[in-house]
Image (cartoon, rainbow, N blue to C red):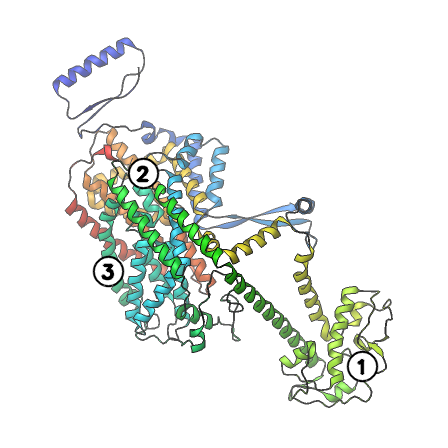
Amino acid sequence: MSGLLYITGPPTANDRLLLAVILVGHLHLTSAAPLPIVVSDTGVMSNYSASEIDTSSIQSPRSIITLVVFVLTNCAVLFPFHVPFLLPLWVCNAILRVLVALRIISPPRHRLQKRWQCFKFPVNFVTAPLIADLFLLAILAIGRDEVYGGTIGSNNIFPIDIMAFFLTLAYVAISIDASGLVRYLAFKVLQKGGKVGHRLFFYLYVFFFGLGSFIGNDPIILSGTAFLAYMTRVSSNIVHPRAWIHSQFAVANIASAILVSSNPTNLVLAGAFHLRFIDYTANMIVPVLVTGIVLFPFLLYIVFADESLIPLSITMYELDEDARSKKPVNPNIPNARGTAKDTETQQANGTPSKQLSLEEIMNPFLDKGGATFGAIIMAATLITLLVLNATSQKTGEHPVFYVTLPAAFVMFCWDLSFGWIHRKETRELAAKGRAEIAAAEEAAREAELAKLTWNKLAEQGLLDEATHTVNPETEASGPRTLGSQNTPGADSTLSTSPTRPLQSISGALKAVGIYVTNEDTADTLTKGICLSNSVRGKGKGAVVSHGKDADGKTVAGNGHVMTMGHEVTDIDAEKLSSPILSGMDTERQDTSLDRSSPGQAPATLVSLCKKAYVWSQETFPTVTTVLAHLPFALVPFALSMFVLVQALVNKGWVAVFAYGWYHWVDKTGTVGSVGGMGFLSVILCNFAGTNIGTSILLSRVIQAWVEIHKSKNLPISDRTFWAAVYSMALGVNYGAFSAAFSASLAGLLWRDILARKHIRVPSLEFARVNLPIITISMIVGCTVLIAEIYIMRNDKPINFSKL
């Protein structure tokens, strides 16, 4: 006989007598352990697990190792690094041969030379938790229970359901972003704000806050960050984009605290404490709104009170009429802008070109159909979630991804259909862009050739730098460096104006201002590079069949004269090229090899995957873009962190933390509960595996805290309990803009987007700028939350049966 006997309410004298009779009978009939009896004055039956609040196991070696591994894992997430390891040459060659034989990769063009090859393994937020879990499994520190609880779920937290919900809803949100809606609305806000700096800052602040509360912070980070980078770049009097980008990042994370669906941390909290979505929003909206209202003047007049950051009047570069009249280009189509690539287009002075930035802002692309349909799907999904969650008798009765999965599938089908219907147009744009890029690359090679030729001519005294012409006296002296031989009777007059279009090398000379009007000289230059390419491609034994002089003889490099059809056997190929042509011929040959190899080599798995990806980009640009931006890395990271925290629970460490929290709240009360949990959640966001890892850990701590009160038969006031829960919600959302980029996955994404837009944000600057912002945000949010808790809640014991 085993089990747990519950008596609810204060026990009477008859109850005590009954207990004694049952206990005596139980001991008489069986030798089993006595039946545990819990008497609760709160009128709630306790269902705690004694092992979850048992701290006796923390002294075991495996328990200590588990804690050390957890700390080291969080350090690796905070400071990612690479682990170098060496492999012998024969192992690398064997692996390459197998991969080539299986036609996974193409044969390498260059053989490995070093006896030991160095490789680097990344240790970051994806690999570190996974390695930690595998290590703990290997030493039997964790087992099936921890893996099951960290993936399938335990204690009302269901990781797989949370991941499915977040990814499916994220598809809808990022699809809306891919339609261009966010950038288009930002453009309208920019028009509305005009050139008044403070008014524009306010409009953008409100815009990002409102949109972030609806669709979450990820779409705001994806499009809003790029928009601000472009806007500050094309403004002549915004010295640094610091004020705009930091404000946008802060307000996006503040707004994400309003709805459960806006952030995966909110999903963890709602699941852990059986929170209905409508109840969560009702308790969070007031502190978040007040934070947003108070923070704006603080940012404008204190943190960024510098006219070089937020000018009173913003001077923007103007977009010409031709660019405005052009049809906006879908940025999701590869190479759609041709040579106007933001990451590659550079002005002569080395600064990023502003033309593309102006086009991105002042002439944004908008897929009206996709944006409208996506907005309808998102609104319908969120309303359905709120209604179903509010009317459910029991929280978690049906997984929330039952609603978001169909919505994502409908949006996916829309994107597929739209891409297939317009595939002809998108493929034409991509092909045109590729052609422009190829032409630009060829022009760049010619320019490099011209530059090299200029330098060679100048070094060897063949260039008259005063007139930018080839020195006639030097040319008449012979073909010693030009790789040519003068034609008898040829006119050697040179001038600064060409008499006919020159091609190849002579055209390259013209590109840098060197004009050769002597036709024989021009022909010789052109033939010289052709001869050089021909000989290099064939080496010894090549038959040279072009490049005649007036006597019908072939002209070779360095003044070598060969008759037509004469086989080159004794002359080294390198000697047949002039010093002027040698460098660029080698480059041309390498480039030609690069361009021709894919077509000549047999198909491999890698090449087929590349072709399939390009085809999908050109046929289904929206779907490909959305799938590329979905936070798939969140899945292995979150599941691995769930397993690690579950290991801490089973090893007794969470109970240790919970006892510490128990004593803190016992001494400080409700105000201490708000302040302490808010402070802990912000700090741990930077040191406990992002805000997701922090929400997982602290949720388990609060659950253990509740079990400690149950075990001691002590009530928790309704006011104190919910003060801890909602202050944690504030902290894990606000903590994203605290001290480290790795405090949230959104921070890592934000930093990478800015780096692609030529804006570098050092780690120390990120912490320094965010320190006053997070300080005022948490003070305001926690203060309003305390007032709300005291007004809306009371000191009656909380009903544990609802947790």
The quarter in which the N terminus is drawn is top left
Q: Amino acid at mark 2?
A: Val
Residue 513 sits in which quadrant?
Answer: bottom right
Q: Is residue 740 visible?
A: no
Contact (Cβ within 8 Å) of mark 3 with mark 1: no
Is 567 rendered above or below residue 159?
A: below
Secondary structure found at label 3: helix
Q: Which residue is mark 3?
A: 293
- Percent coordinates x, y for residue 273 in the rendering: 28, 39
Q: Amino acid at mark 1?
A: Gln
Which mark sits nearer the N-terminus, 3 or 2? 3
Most distant residue in the top direction = 28
Is 427 rendered above or below residue 799?
A: below
Residue count near mark 3 (Cα–Cα under 10 Å), binned few <14, some 14–19, many ≥20: few
Mark 3 or 1: the one toward you: 1
Q: Residue at x 54, y 66 (%)?
A: 433
Q: Amino acid at mark 3?
A: Ile
Contact (Cβ within 8 Å) of mark 3 with mark 2: no
Q: Which residue is mark 2?
A: 701
Q: CA distance from mark 1 to mark 2?
A: 88 Å
Q: Is residue 46 left or right of residue 684?
A: left
- Percent coordinates x, y for residue 582 in the rendering: 73, 71
Q: Which residue is mark 1?
A: 485
Which mark sits nearer the N-terminus, 3 or 1? 3
Secondary structure found at label 1: loop
Is 333 rendered above or below residue 491?
A: above
Q: CA distance from mark 3 to mark 1?
A: 81 Å
Viewer-nearest residue: 424 or 483: 424
Q: Residue at x 67, y 57 (%)?
A: 599
Q: Is residue 340 left or right of residue 183?
A: right
Q: CA distance from mark 3 to mark 2?
A: 32 Å
- Percent coordinates x, y for residue 631 in the rendering: 43, 50
